[in-house]
Amino acid sequence: MLVIGSRGSKLALWQANYVKARLEALGEECRIEVIKTTGDLITHVPMKEVGSKGIFTKEIEEALVDARIDLAVHSLKDMPTVLPEGLEITSTPERQDVRDVLIGRTLNELHAGARVGTGSLRRIAQLRAMRPDLLVEGIRGNVDTRIRKLDDGEYHAIVLAAAGLKRLGLADRIAEFIPVESMCPAVGQGALAIETRLDGGAGMQASQKLDDPATRAAITAERAVLAKLGGGCQVPIGAYGSIAGQSLHLRAIVISPDGLRMVREEITGPASEAFAIGSSMADRLLAAGAGAILESVYG
């Protein structure tokens, strides 16, 4: 029996059960092991103060290394670009909607001084660039917690990922989909990562059957941008790769937290050269001034 490691939130369990069902349809027998992560335990501290590298993955990866689980299911955008030795993302199933969304009100419906909640520095920065008159504030907690805070009147609107809401059956709460041209998504947003040991074992072999080549190419390019820029999942960097036939179009942004300084680039090339395209994108961003923006963030 394959043991699937997962966080215990509703969304994480939806994702784990999705992978479980896909594997069982292929004849595998599976069960889910819930593992608490540092990110689940520290919910009262803003993400930018916690530090982001591996806080939602570390304990699950330790269980993988110790062979207590056979595979782990993560939200890809939570994954550091450098993984523990002996572990690899061996599968990226078909991606969901990559867009960010507003819940509560649309951007045009928000009055000057309206409170908008988001836990992401990338979203905060891009919102401030679009609407500097809004009061953008940090928010922590799972999807249900954030929506409850909105419904209790703590915020006029909140920003979440479309993918999570759709997976949880909450798409009817979406007030507005924000186009990727206006708010560049996080690296890996909307995609799942199945992580296993690189041991050729049952978990690795089974997970590889779920890999989607188009998703794999897109996230390879996006993660190459992030790796070269030295960013984690809580820095103001966005990257989105889209596949059309054999072609990969990559857009990316580096933006200061106040939304005043921004470097934005686009590049197109063969999907088979995804990593090189991502690396080239990072070079373009750095040449255009992204390094100075990131240095101001890292302090």
Image (cartoon, grey):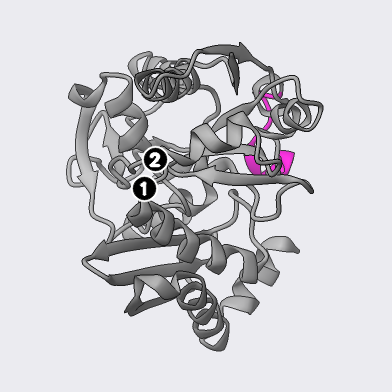
Q: Residues within 10 Å of mark 1 (few under 14, many from 20)?
A: some
Residue that numbered label 2 is attached to: 93
**Dot 1 lies on which element?**
loop
Q: Which range of residues does the magenta coloring cover?
A: 42-51
Q: Position of residue 228 (x, y in %)?
A: 63, 71
Q: Quadrant of residue 135?
A: top left
Q: Nearer the viewer, residue 123 or 55?
A: 55
Q: Position of residue 131 (x, y in %)?
A: 32, 55
- Type of amino acid at the residue the image marks with label 2: Pro
Q: Quadrant of residue 15?
A: top left
The correct choice, above or below, for 298 with respect to 107 in the image is below
Q: Is residue 245 magenta?
A: no
Q: Nearer the viewer, residue 52 or 78?
A: 78
Residue shown at 60% from the left, 38% from the top: 195
Task: Give the position of the N terminus as an image quadrant.
Answer: top right
Q: Is residue 44 magenta?
A: yes
Circles 2 and 1 in contact, beta carbons < 8 Å: yes
**Dot 2 lies on which element?**
loop
The correct choice, above or below, for 56 with respect to 97 in the image is above
Q: Quadrant of residue 270?
A: bottom left
Residue 106 visible from this viewpoint:
no
The answer to which of marks 2 and 1 sits earlier in the sequence is 2
As drawn, the label of residue 26 is none
- Type of amino acid at the residue the image marks with label 1: Asp
Is residue 172 toward the left or the right of residue 168 in the image?
A: left
As drawn, the label of residue 212 is 1
In terms of secondary structure, what is the magenta stretch mainly?
Answer: loop
Q: Residues within 10 Å of mark 2 (few under 14, many from 20)?
A: many
Q: CA distance from mark 2 to mark 1?
A: 5 Å
